[in-house]
Image (cartoon, helix red, strand yellow):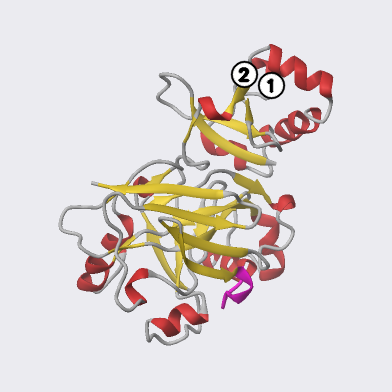
Amino acid sequence: MKLVHFLDGDASLPRPGLLLPSGEEVVDLLSPHSGVASPSCPLEIFNLDGDVLPEIRVCAASLEDDEALGSLRDSGCLLAKSSLRLTSPVPWPRKVVAIGRNYREHAEEQGADIPEEPLIFSKFPTSVIGPGETVLIPPGCENLDYEAELGVVIGRKAVAVSEEEAMDHVFGYLNVNDVSARDFQFGDGQWQRGKSCDTFAPMGEFVATADEIPNPQDLAIRFRLNGETLQDSSTSLMIFQVAELVSYVSRFCTLEPGDVIATGTPAGVGFARTPPVWLKEGDVMEVEIDGLGILENPVGR
């Protein structure tokens, strides 16, 4: 399944939706015609042990029946994606945990040592935005950079889980752009401000459930700036794979449904290029990962 959140009309709060395989229509999961009970909180739909997800799966299975599909369309439960404004598919994550230098070539291009353990930092939840939303250049920033990353959405509470158990705690995957103010990051001597400004964590367009991505370590990952490919790699080149990361992070902080782990970026970032490539107002960024669609965001002030 592919899950989205969206705004319809003048609505101020995102609604959960199920993206049809065509990619052109969305089931409004809060519609009484969907057969899905309203979640107790927005993150409940990512709970692998909750009551809502099985109902969403039943709804998804019904879409294979033409009569059921027609009934949903007639009820107004089925909406044209083009009529909606998609938000981040995980609109209010409790935590966004990010991993630094998780691709050998990326570490090498910046002249850094290969980490012996995952390098963890965080991005504030207020940095999260959705597809099409504008990444804002913060006051005083001259060196704004991009980082295409595979995001992992947690689906089950994880506390000190083993690598063998880790994948049982993964709900699904999505595109993430770990936008970074390099002058803040390097000037501060630590990464929090440079990584966590508002709008610095675009995500989307959708979360693909884990069954849709049988091997997250064999996905092409690309970044394009104004149509030009600047990153072109594979998740197979991660130093620490998804299972290792979930296990490692869970040793130090409890992971909960709806938490997102951004797994690091491959080589080709702007600050490591000669000359450097900095994002500027009017630029358009695209993150594309196999099976996860395209995340597009403009840059502005």
The residue segment tinted magenta is 235-241
Q: Based on the displayed image, in which of its 4 quarters is residue 230 positioned?
A: bottom left
User: Which residue has dot 1 on it?
Assistant: 34
Callout 1 secondary element:
helix
Within 10 Å of disc 1 (Cα), the crowding (few <14, some 14-19, many 20+) is: many
Question: In the rendered image, which quarter is residue 181 located in?
Answer: bottom left
State the image coordinates of residue 233 (x, y, percent, origin top left). 56, 71
Q: Position of residue 79 (x, y in %)?
A: 60, 23
Dividing the image into 4 quarters, which one contains the N terminus?
top right
Residue 297 seen by the camera: yes
Q: Is residue 240 magenta?
A: yes
Q: Residue at x 59, y 49 (%)?
A: 293
Q: Is residue 131 above or below residue 218?
A: above
Q: Residue furthest front?
A: 227
Q: Is residue 147 above or below residue 83?
A: below
Q: Position of residue 47 (x, y in %)?
A: 63, 42
**Marks 2 and 1: CB-CB under 8 Å?**
yes
Q: Look at label 2 and name its amino acid.
A: Ser
Q: Nearer the viewer, residue 98 or 106?
A: 106
Where 16 sits versus 67, above or below?
A: below
Q: Residue at x 51, y 51 (%)?
A: 259
Residue indicated by mark 2: 31
Q: Position of residue 289 (x, y in %)?
A: 59, 58
